[in-house]
Amino acid sequence: GEDVEQSLFLSVREGDSSVINCTYTDSSSTYLYWYKQEPGAGLQLLTYIFSNMDMKQDQRLTVLLNKKDKHLSLRIADTQTGDSAIYFCAEESYGGSQGNLIFGKGTKLSVKP
Amino acid sequence: DADVTQTPRNRITKTGKRIMLECSQTKGHDRMYWYRQDPGLGLRLIYYSFDVKDINKGEISDGYSVSRQAQAKFSLSLESAIPNQTALYFCATESSDLVNEQFFGPGTRLTVL
């Protein structure tokens, strides 16, 4: 079945760039997503990319998509302590036991001052 | 006011007790989900519903049941709670527009002793 893989932890210094990587399996996904979970809260959609795009930039966030390798990344420029959170990559599914979105296990980003 | 609310926010119970977690939404979305989150395991889908009285099993539905009697409400029941159901539980609603964005509640922390 479909699966989304991402590393569990990333630690960076404040001001550096963070790159969170993700691999997915379903090449038919129309959109791929990044969700952010701040401590003590639910997930919130951070950004998404249409599968026909290679890159999407939104202020400090850059999403890169390599469809051939099924690789998605999220780059956060000038990382701040407020960016400390868990970041989930997600691909689309189409019902069955996985619902409409398949989430990775999440990457916990720790930002050190 | 929050669009997706969950009650209770925290609950401690004993093995064998019946527990109900409630989710309400004011977003007018047809689709609703229940997930559990465990450290290192990410989000796992328990049940989901695409409409009133529509119920679909997720990956880990055993030991749980749900009810969707109204569009705005989706409740999750643990018929006989066991310690390995100790987790953080999230309800989510989904827009059925072009982008499958899910909106999460704040979570319910359940501890089964």
Image (tube, rainbow, N blue to C red):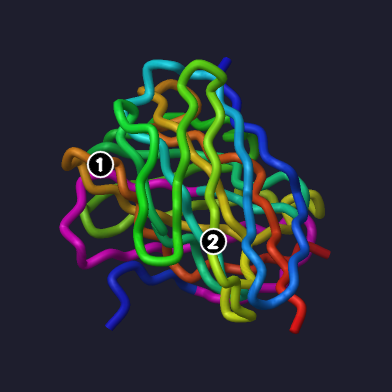
Q: Give the SS element for disc 1.
A: loop
Q: Which mark is residue A25?
A: none
Where is B107 relative to B18, above or below? below
Q: Nearer the viewer, residue A5 or A101?
A: A5
Q: Badge 2 is on which residue?
A: A76
- Name which quarter of the figure residue A12 lies in: bottom right
- Relative side of A34 to B81, left or right: left
Is B51 left or right of A54, judged from the image as shown?
left
Q: Distance between the Cα atoms at labels 1 and 2?
A: 22 Å
The residue segment tinted magenta is: B8-34
Residue A47 locus on image (x, y percent): 38, 53
Relative to residue A107, is residue B6 depicted above or below? Answer: below
Q: Residue, x 53% and y 72% (percent of image)?
A: A41
**Mark 1 Cα-neighbour bin, 10 Å: few <14, some 14–19, many ≥20:** some
In the rendering, at what x and y percent does residue B41 appear? Answer: 72, 44
The residue lying toward the viewer, choosing from A67 and B25, is: A67
**Subunit ID for the residue under disc 1:** B
Q: Which residue is mark 1?
A: B99
Describe residue A64's horizontal placement relative to residue B73 as left or right: right
Residue pictured at 59% horizontal, 60% vertical: B19
Tag 2: Cα neighbours inside 10 Å, few (<14), some, or many (≥20)?
many
Residue B91 image point, x, y percent: 44, 56
* Between A49 and B25, the one nearer to me in the picture: A49
Give the residue drawn at x 20%, y 41%.
B96
Q: Is residue B16 magenta?
A: yes
Q: Is residue B10 magenta?
A: yes
Q: Nearer the viewer, residue A80 or B27?
A: A80
Would you say B60 lies left or right of B13 here? left
Foreground mark, 1 or 2?
2
Instruction: Name the residue rendered at 51%, 58% in the picture.
Output: B90
Above or below, comparing residue A49 to residue A19 in the picture: above
Label 2 marks which chain's residue? A
